[in-house]
Amino acid sequence: MSPVYLADYVELGAGTGIVHSSPAYGVDDFNICKQYGLSNDDIISPVQSNGVYVESLEFFGGQFIFKANQNIIDKLVEVGSLMDTETISHSYMHCWRHKSPLIYRATAQWFVGMDKQPESGETLRKRAVKAIEDTEFVPAWGQARLHSMIANRPDWCISRQRNWGVPIPFFLHKESGDLHPRTVELMEEVAQRVEKEGIEAWFKLDASELLGDEAAKYDKISDTLDVWFDSGTTHWHVLRGSHPMGHESGPRADLYLEGSDQHRGWFHSSLLTGCMLDDHAPYRELLTHGFVVDENGRKMSKSLNNVVAPQKVNDSLGADIMRLWVSATDYSGEMAVSDQILQRSADAYRRIRNTARFLLSNLSGFNPATDILPAEEMLALDRWAVDRTLLLQRELQEHYGEYRFWNVYSKIHNFCVQELGGFYLDIIKDRQYTTAADSTARRSCQTALFHISEALVRWIAPILAFTADELWQFLPGERNESVMLNTWYEGLTEMPADFEMDRAYWERIMAVKTSVNKEMENLRAAKAIGGNLQAEVTLYAEDSLVADLSKLSNELRFVLITSTASVAPLVSAPADAVVTEVAGLKLKVLKSSHAKCARCWHHREDVGVNPEHPEICGRCVDNISGAGEVRHYA
């Protein structure tokens, strides 16, 4: 009589709904038979490790399992026990390397018990689940994934039957199968031999060398450890060895970083061994990244001819552009790369590098030890630029702390393109090139540029490492050998809360300048004007905006980068005034009829008034030979 077991993995829609059980050759069969009380000793496993039936098996002993199939069928026919036979095609497991068919086979192994109750404390599963809850995950979905794996996993089989690997140095009693009573002591002796002679010390060891007269009673096992146990215990060697600092309650790394496949691998095994040893994970945070694919989302493959070789990118574009591409990509999913994508990274890199070059070139002759101005003496626009830099630095610190490198990249790039390149740096060119070298107007600007440079070089250092170190060498002032030896720049000052030209004020001014620039582009396209400095602009605005613009007085033209700029009430706007995207603002641009100053390029009515300087305007004359112009705002 054969017992009948109920199993939820047998489907009524396939076959008869009744299947035979082979607990030694299938996981489902093994588990259901154990569930119904079958012991390990009851499970018959006549297939040896070489795929051959044991000699003692009647009729088929000594035969290779696949070659024995037809003999088994013939025997069933012979004794009248076979009703029918047919060949079917179905999915079957094969060796990934040799492409040959495989079989499951139940063997005696060494396990770490997930639910085995220790002498004190919680089970390993409960400790691991709690450790997951105490760990920060980037991205957050990694926590649920690892939690599910730990909560539902079986006991951990840590032994393997291989000819290589870290040995399990156990001696088992030939009759009882028990470990030698001096196992821990013997393991230490083996470890000392391995330390001197290498891993082969165990494999070539004769048991009598350690057991003496007892050797005949014990078997020296040849099992090796699961390789994930090897990698999962690296925290013991690193955090208690090469980096033993700052671990209050057992070693804990700030971060483990790997691909998403490691929730089942290194993250997983490290968690279990950490909980075994220290009752907590060996890490505070886990960061998971995706895999690199081509621009169409396909896996990199030589056969598809879509492989982007990192060394080739380094040789052609430079390592910093490769690093910038990495930082610009959201690594929580697959990371697309191609020559075209890398070229876009190269373009973005050039924008950041050119901004840094502009900053450096305009710090020529600036000595921060003697020329830097305190915040309260700086022009309003310069104070805004430093304040904006400080606000961005705070955002970047937060993004770096959360490993959101794509946000770091995008905000630095936008800062270089918009606030700096599209606004501030354009405005200060006139001041830099036309005012006296040591004037307050110029020193105020250089002070802001110095602060921005000191911050920027630190922002980009983790990503554009080579560029940052190059920039560091050329910044004025005394400094140590590398930007990598420094922390965030602390010289940035915040704009006072009651400052008249506050952050919101400059946001409104930027919006006005954007509208003026848009109309300038239209006029240039129509060939009505050449450069901005050929233009005379009149802004027709509602009262609140008139008040804002009037605060800049005659310096409004420097902000708009026009030769003249005037403000008038919105109601006085002529019919041909251009309506802008700024609420309550119209504008009209005319080409200046005045001569062009050869020095500042502004078109002014006083060009040539001074006979000693017939080609320049009165402002430039004053900057060259007089007291110099005074700037208050821009």
Image: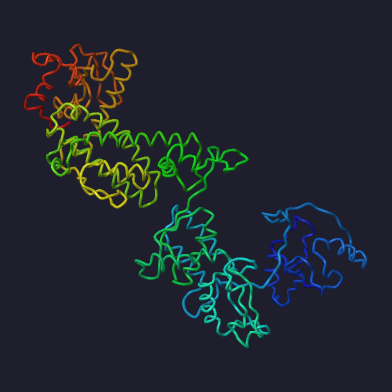
Q: Is residue 71 above or below residue 183?
A: above
Question: Which residue is most to the front?
Answer: 197
What is the basis of the colouring in this image?
A: rainbow
Residue ID at (34%, 16%): 525
Q: Is residue 141 above or below residue 240?
A: above
Rendered location of residue 158, percent (x, y): 58, 69
Q: Is residue 361 above or below residue 197?
A: above
Rendered location of residue 258, percent (x, y): 48, 54
Q: Name the image quarter holding residue 133.
A: bottom left
Question: Which residue is most to the top?
Answer: 593
Residue ID at (14%, 40%): 371
Rendered location of residue 186, percent (x, y): 54, 81
Q: Is residue 251 left or right of residue 479?
A: right
Query: In the depicted view, which residue is nearer to us: 489 or 263?
Result: 489
Q: Is residue 614 left or right of residue 245?
A: left
Query: In the depicted view, which residue is nearer to us: 609 or 203?
Result: 203
Residue ID at (50%, 67%): 272
